Image (cartoon, rainbow, N blue to C red):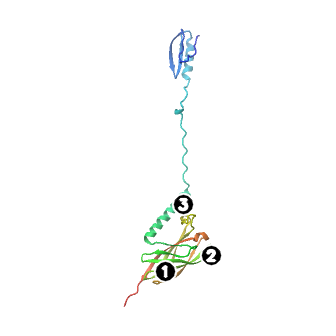
Amino acid sequence: MVIWALCKNGTAQSPNVWGTMTIRGWVGVVCLAASTAACDKLASALQGAKAPVPESAKEAPIPQATTKPDVQTQLADLRLQIFELQRRVSDLENGAAMVSSEEPGYGTARTQFGPFTVQIASVTPYLDGYRVKLTNGNLTSATFKGAKLKVSWGPIDMKDEVDARNFHDKEIGVTDTFLAGTLTPLNVVLTPARPKDIKAIMVEIHLNQMSLRVKR
């Protein structure tokens, strides 16, 4: 049996060879001098050979799935958005007065009947929070009997902005009379509260009954 090796150009040359056949990039040599069994064995070997896989055809790595945000983080973001929406609605309807336990001065709460001033008179520890004495000034010419206060309190972040994520709020009903052009003291208890939690206090005033003097 005479079988020639492949030439440099991929084609076998021999006087005993009457033809060539290319299979998967290889050249199969058909030899007249070889036995039928040997040729079949050679053809099977050549057909089973695999061509190298190009780099471009290799499977690209599957990118890792992005990590879903933490549920607690999503809830905190939703609470912040709700707080901001409530604050904007409050500004349009009944604007809250914002005061601080660290800075003197007063804020102005807008009601449906007119403005009220709010000022912190004193702060004393009470249970797990603080008792805060507020002074409310009725800037209108009407007298009001009773009111509902919505008080919010919380810390201020490093940028001197309200940290809405850690804010608390409560509603307080009072039966005091707010005379026209008069300051009225009110006591509110803020619990739980730490010293840094009362750096920002927001007060909304919702009035109940209004009365005016009748000219005779």
Check disc 2 and report the residue beneath it: 125
Check disc 3 and report the residue beneath it: 76
| Residue found at x 51% / y 15% | 20
| Residue found at x 45% / y 77% | 115
The numbered dot on residue 117 is none
Of the 4 image quadrants, the one containing the C terminus is bottom left
Residue nearer the viewer, 26 or 198: 198
Q: Position of residue 102 (x, y in %)?
A: 58, 73
Q: Disc 1 on helix, strand or loop?
A: strand
Q: Position of residue 182 (x, y in %)?
A: 48, 83
> Disc 1 vs disc 2: which is toward the camera?
1
Residue nearer the viewer, 188 or 110: 110
- How crowded pointer 1 is (Cα within 10 Å; few <14, some 14-19, many 20+) is rated as many
Q: In this view, does 11 lie above or below 89?
A: above
Real-space Cα distance between discs 1 and 3?
36 Å
Of the 4 image quadrants, the one containing the N terminus is top right
- How crowded pointer 3 is (Cα within 10 Å; few <14, some 14-19, many 20+) is rated as some
The numbered dot on residue 137 is 1
Q: Position of residue 9 (x, y in %)?
A: 53, 18
Real-space Cα distance between discs 2 and 3?
29 Å
| Residue found at x 52% / y 22% | 25
Q: Disc 2 on helix, strand or loop?
A: strand
Which three-letter amino acid code belongs to the residue tagged 2? Pro
> Disc 1 vs disc 3: which is toward the camera?
1
Tell me if I can see residue 184 in this picture: yes
Real-space Cα distance between discs 1 and 2?
25 Å
